[in-house]
């Protein structure tokens, strides 16, 4: 397998609005990121992925871009960004930008011109349609609730917005749109950025028939998934993007691609695809979905989690590269979703880190994950800021009008705001995030869970992340080795081996709050192995044996003899 720097890197994702506020206006900024570059470097990360920092009216917290070549005023100036880039590079940290080109803000210059005159060349930069039978062009529903079409009185037509009303979709069928996007991308790459994370990139090609989507019984709006995700020309567009821009630079590219299979991933990120380095898939994130979609608090089945991980590890091996993540700015906190954020918070957070850093792929760490930050106990909808959450609350209240407690429980479990509360730096006012009033409330557990406490405690989640990153870089088998699962039917234990040439490591993880007893396959037990790292303070299983007992949330990595 060809070695690449982006395969060997660890990425640290920053949500700038909530990372650190350097001017005490309640909003995180570029100055705050510059202050903490040493923190990220000391953790062991190699790359910083910045969520959008471009000029935006913030209908969707920066994912509605008004000007791709200007920095959002709340975050600073282009001079601040240039300083961040140079300081990061001086510390051997790379910067990956968030590329949002499925849609713009409705305040973008192109959309404003698109609305003005049917004959101007910008009209075809977006997707405008006449209504049908006095209603929308089709029944597609917005990902944030309601219709995906908005009637514009000035134009006397509907425009498509797969997300918020203020996020009109660009028309990628228009070659001028594509050329404009490529020119903007090259502008940032010439500035020196080290790659792009590409927002909803598999949605840029729409089926031009614009047929109605499938709708659940009694539902007005249908899904656009099969007509948009992995659309008819998406690979043509991405190969063109690669040819015109990406292939000219030594960069990292990762696409956000919901609803894809392993076969799809081979098309987007296959070593011979000439499109992207890797993609984010969401099968493990979507586990447990029910009639309310993601809005539930059902526990995740370890059997299902193992099946997803194993399928992606084996199907892509030698053909494409995985991206590895538990959380991001769109997900609840990892330890609350996949671990135990109560009694076993620290231990289960370490367990999740063990799995993250011992699979094949590039690991992504979301800010605060490395100290075990948890979901937020908001008790009123007024405390939330996320447009998706507010719309879901409105819909769920209509469904369960007599059960506000249930609605709040579901919202708390899965809201994107769980990941967006301020980074918890210390136990001072506002968790050390800002002296001003934060744009979103701080999680009240910040006095216990914060960076200062983690750094002072040698047995903390932070120090375990440091150790796991070091271990991953020390043993090439953890990066490039093959993946072989064992004990696949065990209800508590996740067990697999990573092997590269003469180097082999065995990973044993107890994903439960109960003691687990296992009997290793004879060929593994006979080979034997010595403990390299454990999330237990006083590990008992220092050597592999035929029969072993693991305490709740134990996680061990062994170097095989």
Image (spheres, rainbow, N blue to C red):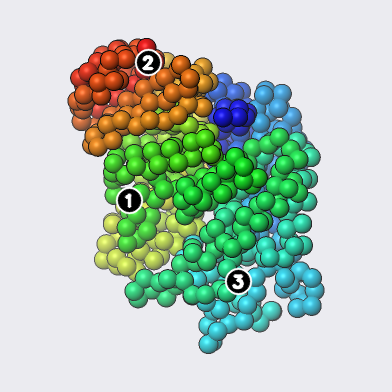
Vertical comparison of 339 with 402: above or below: above
Residue 373 at x, y percent in the picture: 42, 35
- Report the residue at 76% width, 75% height from top: 116
Q: Earlier in the sequence, mark 1 or mark 3?
A: 3
Q: Which mark is residue 288?
A: 1
Quadrant showing the N terminus: top right
Residue 356 at x, y percent in the picture: 44, 32
Task: Specify few, some or many for label 3: CA neighbours under 10 Å numbering under 14, 14-19, or 20 or more.
Answer: few
- Report the residue at 60% width, 71% height from top: 208
Residue denoted by label 2: 560
**The residue tagged with tag 3: helix, strand or loop?**
loop
Q: Nearer the viewer, mark 2 or mark 1?
A: 2
**The residue tagged with tag 1: helix, strand or loop?**
loop
- Report the residue at 73% width, 48% height from top: 243
Give whichever of 24, 105 is nearer the camera: 105
- Report the residue at 63% width, 77% height from top: 129
Q: Is residue 56 in view?
A: no
Q: Is residue 8 left or right of residue 109?
A: left
In which quadrant of the rendered view does residue 214 lie? bottom left
Q: Which mark is residue 208?
A: 3
Vertical comparison of 12 with 439: above or below: above
In which quadrant of the rendered view does residue 127 lie? bottom right
Residue 128 at x, y percent in the picture: 65, 74
């Amino acid at each position: 397998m060809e070695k690449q720097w982006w395969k060997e890197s660890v990425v640290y994702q920053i949500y700038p609005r909530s990372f650190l506020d350097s001017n005490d206006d309640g909003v995180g900024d570029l100055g705050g990121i510059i202050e903490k570059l040493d923190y990220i470097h000391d953790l062991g990360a190699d790359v910083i992925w910045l969520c959008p920092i471009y000029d935006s009216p913030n209908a969707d917290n920066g994912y509605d871009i008004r000007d791709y070549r200007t920095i959002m005023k709340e975050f600073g100036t282009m001079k601040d960004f240039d300083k961040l880039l140079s300081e990061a590079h001086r510390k051997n940290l790379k910067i990956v930008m968030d590329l949002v080109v499925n849609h713009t803000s409705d305040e973008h210059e192109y959309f404003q011109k698109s609305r003005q005159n049917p004959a101007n060349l910008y009209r075809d930069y977006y997707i405008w349609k006449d209504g049908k039978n006095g209603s929308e062009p089709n029944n597609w529903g917005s990902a944030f609730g309601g219709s995906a079409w908005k009637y514009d009185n000035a134009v006397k037509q509907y425009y498509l917005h797969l997300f918020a009303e203020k996020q009109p979709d660009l028309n990628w069928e228009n070659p001028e749109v594509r050329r404009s996007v490529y020119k903007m991308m090259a502008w940032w790459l010439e500035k020196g950025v080290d790659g792009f994370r590409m927002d909803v990139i598999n949605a840029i090609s729409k089926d031009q028939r614009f047929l109605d989507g499938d709708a659940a019984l009694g539902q007005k709006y249908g899904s656009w998934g099969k007509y948009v995700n992995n659309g008819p020309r998406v690979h043509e567009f991405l190969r063109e993007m690669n040819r015109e821009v990406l292939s000219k630079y030594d960069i990292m590219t990762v696409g956000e691609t919901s609803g894809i299979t392993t076969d799809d991933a081979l098309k987007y990120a296959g070593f011979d695809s000439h499109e992207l380095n890797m993609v984010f898939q969401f099968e493990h994130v979507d586990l447990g979905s029910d009639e309310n979609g993601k809005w539930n608090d059902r526990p995740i089945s370890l059997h299902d989690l193992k099946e997803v991980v194993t399928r992606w590890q084996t199907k892509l091996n030698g053909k494409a590269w995985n991206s590895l993540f538990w959380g991001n700015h769109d997900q609840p906190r990892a330890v609350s979703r996949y671990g135990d954020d109560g009694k076993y918070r620290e231990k289960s957070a370490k367990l999740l880190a063990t799995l993250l850093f011992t699979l094949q792929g590039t690991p992504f760490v979301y800010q605060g994950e490395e100290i075990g930050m948890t979901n937020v106990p908001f008790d009123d909808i007024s405390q939330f800021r996320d447009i998706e959450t507010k719309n879901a609350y409105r819909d769920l209240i209509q469904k369960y009008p007599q059960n506000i407690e249930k609605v709040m429980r579901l919202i708390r479990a899965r809201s994107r705001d769980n990941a967006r509360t301020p980074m918890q730096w210390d136990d001072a006012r506002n968790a050390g995030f800002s002296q001003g009033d934060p744009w979103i409330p701080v999680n009240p557990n910040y006095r216990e869970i914060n960076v200062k406490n983690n750094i002072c405690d040698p047995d903390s989640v932070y120090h375990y992340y440091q150790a796991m990153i070091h271990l991953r870089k020390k043993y090439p088998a953890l990066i490039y080795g093959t993946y072989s699962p064992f004990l696949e039917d065990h209800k508590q234990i996740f067990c697999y081996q990573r092997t590269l040439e003469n180097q082999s490591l065995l990973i044993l993880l107890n994903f439960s709050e109960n003691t687990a007893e296992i009997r290793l396959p004879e060929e593994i037990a006979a080979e034997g192995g010595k403990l390299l790292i454990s999330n237990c303070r006083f590990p008992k299983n220092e050597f592999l044996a035929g029969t072993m007992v693991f305490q709740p949330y134990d996680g061990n990595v062994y170097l095989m003899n």
